[in-house]
Image (tube, grey):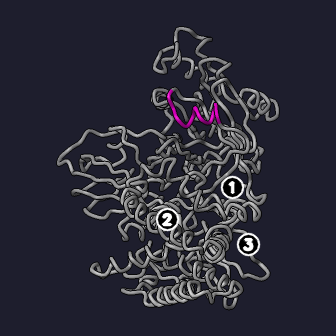
Amino acid sequence: MTGAASNIVPPLSSNYWKGSTLTIAWGTVALFAVIVAGYGFLFISTIQGSAAIWWALPLSTLLCYLSFTVMHEAGHGNIIQSRATMKPLENAMGWLSALPFFILPYRLFAAIHDQHHAFTNDPERDPDYWVGSGSFWQASYRSFSQIWHYLYRIATGLYRNPAFAGSFYSSILHYLLVGTFIYLMLTAGYGWELLMLGVVPLLISLYVLAMLFDWIPHTPSKHQGRYRNTRIYRAPGLKYLTLGQNYHLIHHMYPRVPWYHYERVFHEVRPELEANNAAIENLVPHFLKAPSSYGPLDCNETLKLNLCVTHIRHETPDAVVIEFETLNQQPLRFQAGQYITVSKQFGQEQVTRCYSICESPSSGKLSIGVKRVANGLMSNYLNRELKAGDCLTVAGPFGEFTLEAGAVVPRTKPLEQYCFIAAGSGITPILSLMKTALERDSCTHVQLIYFNRSQASALFMNELIALEKRWSPRLTIIHGFDDDNPSSSTDCHSAAKQNFLLQSLKTLAFDQVQTLFYLCGPEALKAMVMKTLSDLSVTEQQILVENFSLDIPQPEGVLHQVKIQLANGQQHQLDVASNQTVLEVARQQRLSIPHACGVGQCGCCMMKITNGQATLANPNAVAILPAEQQQGFTLACQCRPQSDLILCEQSGHI
């Protein structure tokens, strides 16, 4: 995921990997031929009674292990890539290679493996997280039940995904053939051979495959970003033992490259990987020790992580402060005033919301304040159901509501005064900004005007009291409570409230030219404050406003038909004018598509234009790189169609 603080460089490998794709992957075809010959020899030897367990068991295990690679490559469409007339042959190879896995049909595997690629390391949506996220011992015993876990995930929800619809009939045929084979072997008196040459090799292969494809590449499963959601581990000859899966990151980045070309692509794109902190290790002595796998590293970059909750503090009956773990004792680097996104699966819908960080960067902590919103799926879950120890998908940091953004405002002398104005949960980023401003410069004076309905509903009251006591006289706080002034009620436009603001500003005796104002709160409050400051001759350059809401313009001109294909198989269709963005119209029509910030900063709504033309509402949106635009990517929150469009969600791209 890219963002305002990202250090990710434009891809160096845009064309390199394409030279490693093949019309026909003859290496995989040869591997399939070896497997068929091996199983034929094994079956004939068993029927003739000449198969000794001491050599037949290892041979059957090896053949089962090799079969997975053919099934895996066929599932990605890598065996025959561009000859449509030969695709049935590729499907047949994948189908036959799945038979040694008994209860895992080829089409079912291909569909669920696509889920792994789309949602790598996502605790709720990655089916391989079951093995990849645990300790070595957890992975060891879970590996034997991996196939059953796949079937459980399908039975408990994934079957609704249209991507699985095409797999059911072929799966029934698979089960009929496997069941018939098992029945015939048992009735013919080959039960022992079936156990030792079928079941036992399968269990051994499952363990090895789970380790090579899931646990070793993905542990500790904290990162979901493109460059750090898996690793590369190298040693002489290892690529032959793992069939290239020690270059697992290459496979995830370029899944259309055949397994025996991973190493070649790695050498071509290595500068790009290193520039983006990819986990590249030597088997000895640094195996599973790449710092980039375990922590955020000491650099400014935007990350997508799985973070566990370490502590939940109830601020008010309707608000909590949630503190997240630090990775490898390295706190996430952020600027005061920035926010993160939090994602959670609710049924078949992935919900992502923005929450501001309430700590100062120097604290070494990552905490957010969350106020419950009526009928809000995420806020209600975080307030009422979330427990310490639960893990959430967290991305960030994002946002330009920072002290650094204010530092560029022209002034005639060093900045010595900040005035923060907040209402309700708008205090969350303001609190981080206040603490940081006071810590940085002993000459800085900070003033806060904080509106709430009542003292009982105000967030961080105890912390604000402690801060005022610690930093007095450099910190001044003025509270405005609706229950202290019934005439203003909750109407932010009321004359009483506006008069209170005006008198508070006059009491603070701020420098009209030198003071910087930071504002976060409801839209009505923002409008009132902006008007009041304007009346006091404060320029717009001196005012920084945090915005999360979207204004939806009325359509102008021709309406273009936009079809959206989501990674979970859902499809939406809407009409969007050239002066509107896709996200604006989707939200207006209550259609659920991936998004978070809504202003082109976080990249959660990254999509690929597969047909049609579009422009960006903000050509300088920080969440999409020029090279990505050239490759046909766009952001739903910035995408303005210039013709009919087809958009495909690119979850694996983030």
From this viewpoint, is residue 24 visible? yes
The residue carrying mark 2 is 179
How many neighbours does mark 3 have within 10 angstroms: few (below 14), some (14-19), or many (20 or more)? many
Of tags 3 and 1, the one toward the viewer is 3
Find the magenta span and give its range: 375-385
Residue 214's spot in the image, x, y percent? 63, 67
Q: Is residue 53 left or right of residue 125?
A: right
Question: In the image, which disc is placed on residue 332?
Answer: 1
Amino acid at the residue labelled 3 = Leu
Residue 139 among those drawn in magenta: no
* Amino acid type at mark 1: Leu
Q: Nearer the viewer, mark 2 or mark 3?
A: 2
Compared with residue 281, is residue 444 higher up or lower down, i.e. above or below? Answer: above
Please tell me whether mark 1 or mark 2 is closer to you in this view: 2
Tell me where residue 106 appears, x and y as whole percent.
46, 68
Residue 417's x, y, as percent? Answer: 66, 39
Task: Answer with left or right where residue 342 lies relative to residue 258.
Answer: right
Residue at the spot 18% in from the left edge and 46% down from the top edge: 557
Name the kind of residue labelled 2 in the image.
Gly
Answer few, some or many: residues within 10 Å of disc 1's Cα (few below 14, many 20 plus, some between 14 and 19). Answer: many
Looking at the image, the residue that sits furthest to the front is 188
